[in-house]
Image (spheres, rainbow, N blue to C red):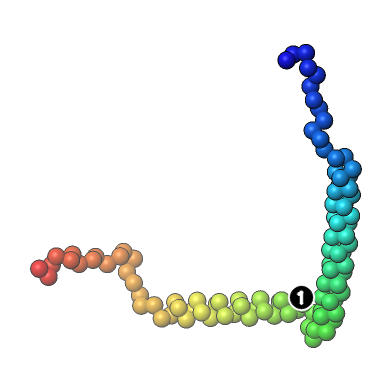
Amino acid sequence: MADQPLQTDLGTNKGMLMAGGVLIGVAGLAGFAGMLLLGSAAVSATRRWVQQLQQPPTQLAKHKWRQARAATTAGAQAWRSSLPAQPSSSPAVASSDSGQ
């Protein structure tokens, strides 16, 4: 068996492999072109939407941040004022067998 040459051809059709590679390349380019068109349309729509706003997005964000900060402060103050004064150490818990 050592006399026989190694068989390197696995019976592959090189023409079909090349055609498959070309088709994959064309599909990749078409997909990339589609992503570019989609991204361009999304950017264009976003720009039109921002231009139609009454306030620029930065001013709107600042206004919402001030509202959230004021609501947080008011909530914290209300929570602190509604809590009864508690001693610094935790109260002792009654044992459960005291009623038996």
Q: How far across and down, in percent of the image, does residue 45 sit?
A: 84, 77
| Residue type at numbered disc 1 | Thr
Residue in the picture at 13% in, 67% down? 98
The quarter of the picture where the C terminus appears is: bottom left
Q: Is residue 39 above or below residue 56?
A: above
Position of 29 with respect to 56 (left or right) is right
Position of 20 with respect to 94 (left or right) is right
Q: Residue tagged by mark 1?
A: 58
Residue in the picture at 27% in, 67% down? 91
Q: How far across and down, in percent of the image, does residue 65 sit?
A: 66, 76
Helix, strand, or loop for circle 1? Answer: helix
Q: Is residue 94 above or below residue 76?
A: above
Q: How far across and down, in percent of the image, does residue 55 sit?
A: 78, 83
Do we see residue 43 in this rendering?
A: no
> Quarter of the image holding residue 31?
bottom right
Q: In the displayed orientation, state which residue is furthest to the left.
A: 100
> Quarter of the image holding residue 59?
bottom right
